[in-house]
Amino acid sequence: MANGNAKETTLHQKILSDIESRIVSGEWQPGFRLPFEVDLAEQYQCSRMTVNKVMTQLAKSGLIERHRKAGSFVSQPRAQSAVLEIHDIETEVKSLGLPYAYALVQRSERQASAEDRRLMDINEATRLVKLLCVHYAGKKPFCVEERRINASAVPEVSDADFATTPPGQWLLRQVPWSTAEHRIQAVGASAEVARSLGVTKGSACLVVERRTWSNLRPITWVRFTYPGDRHTLVARFTPNT
Amino acid sequence: MANGNAKETTLHQKILSDIESRIVSGEWQPGFRLPFEVDLAEQYQCSRMTVNKVMTQLAKSGLIERHRKAGSFVSQPRAQSAVLEIHDIETEVKSLGLPYAYALVQRSERQASAEDRRLMDINEATRLVKLLCVHYAGKKPFCVEERRINASAVPEVSDADFATTPPGQWLLRQVPWSTAEHRIQAVGASAEVARSLGVTKGSACLVVERRTWSNLRPITWVRFTYPGDRHTLVARFTPNT
DNA sequence: AAGTGGTCTAGACCACGGG
DNA sequence: CCGTGGTCTAGACCACTTT
């Protein structure tokens, strides 16, 4: 049907893509009630568990909604949620085929200021390491990184040398798994950023801010500022998966 | 452990969050080999299928990697993938507590130009409807929408009246399920956009471009331009789900 | 009250891949 | 080879929700 050339291996994958294509092709419109699990099991000559696995997956992906006693229904299409891959800057630069370089511009350590507390949701007793770095692609500045690291949560940061290692990579080793929130905006370059990036003041820049927690503790806040004409974020969405 | 106050209901949920918290807390470091399914089933006093469900989910979320004969291992933390919710503009405006309004500025229909083909991956025989619209939050312009719709794939578009209904909502009803690719950039406002948005020319704007396919056919291309100081995209990431 | 999905079990067979 | 995960089954009981 509307299926490219996916190599169907397992039984539940076949059933999944079969039902999926009926939905995305419009054969089963939003609101349509799908056959019950027992009936599908009969149709596909398999056990109910196998069908259930498929239906559970379809429900998780948002393609159908399920209600006990009522049945399973094709969802009304809703707000799209796209997956945004946030890569490491070094990886990003190298995937462009350009040599990567990094420079630490400034470093300080002190108690959290009011501004810090606003950005990071921490109290004033918290110690912070603040960094300003520039990432280069070839000779050109690729982006500016402003970073705050919670030294109370990650005490090793006080001894860390960020002269050669970008703080993002260092943190990834210190705090393996985390939760993050990203904010994406367009802003005009400040005088300082414009100087670091080699662009004119006020020119459009893409700003990605990230706050990171681990075990519910704030770990780091970072703001990446990219020249607007040199960087694009890409996100993809498919009903599958 | 590091778990907030999630109300654990089912057995596999309990096992899942138990293992999850061991990983995110660092008790099980990246590279650590988890107990085998049979052993976990023994530990939790349940069947292997239940453990398998949990482990499969952990693998899908990227927290662990699994290899036959070798076992299951805590993953090395990789590039973060954050989920970006792309909302309908009307919903977005109303969620800010502001009255929503919409205006169609311009409409045309013709064969695809070279520029159109570059943006949409279509051939020159394709007919396109091109629209220019402005979305308002209260009295202020909220964003400008430039849109191209594939009239060969969605012939009903020729009769559609976009004077009162934004094309996004109309399309959602015509083409219920689709694949989309988003590109996010910062650009300086062009003279035309600046006029429509009531900002100064060259001021930073957030641009979200979306290409949409259904059944592998290109359906629509749209570019939303938001004043940079009035709009932020938010994306969240958690190891769960 | 009845029917549906949600969960769980105790098996089973197979394919992959490390030793 | 043979241990591991991947898949599948044919049951079972329960919770929820609509009737």
Image (cartoon, coloured by chain):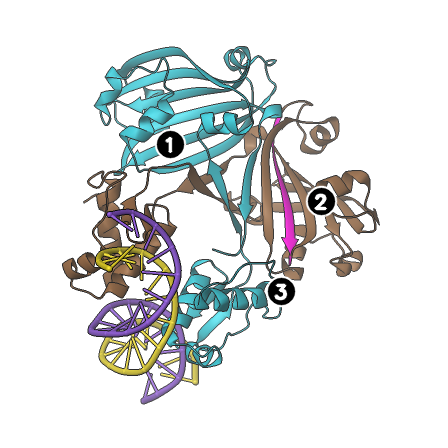
Chain colours: A brown, B cyan, C yellow, D purple
Circle on res. B211: 1
Q: Position of residue A73 (x, y in %)?
A: 28, 45
Please count the marks in the image. Answer: 3
Q: Residue at x 30, y 38 (%)?
A: B177
Q: Position of residue A235 (x, y in %)?
A: 45, 40
Work out whether residue A157 or residue A38 is closer to the camera in this orientation and state it.
A38
**Mark 3, residue position:** B25
**Mark 2, residue position:** A120
Q: Say whether residue A206 is magenta.
A: yes
Q: Residue at x 55, y 18 (%)?
A: B189
Would residue A184 be seen by someone viewing this image from the given angle? yes
Work out whether residue B9 or residue B147 is closer to the camera in this orientation and state it.
B9
Q: Position of residue A58 (x, y in %)?
A: 32, 51
- Check chain identity for marks 1 and 2: say if they share one: no
Chain letter of disc 2? Answer: A
On-image quarter of the N terminus of chain B: bottom right
Q: Nearer the viewer, mark 1 or mark 3?
A: 3
In the rendered image, which quarter is residue B52 located in?
A: bottom left
Q: Position of residue B91 (x, y in %)?
A: 47, 29
Q: Looking at the picture, which amino acid does disc 3 mark?
A: Ser
Q: Disc 3 and disc 2: Cα gap in Å?
A: 21 Å
Number of residues whose C-alpha sits closer than 10 Å to that of mark 3, classed few (under 14), some (14–19) or many (20 or more): some
Q: Nearer the viewer, mark 1 or mark 2?
A: 2
Chain letter of disc 3? Answer: B
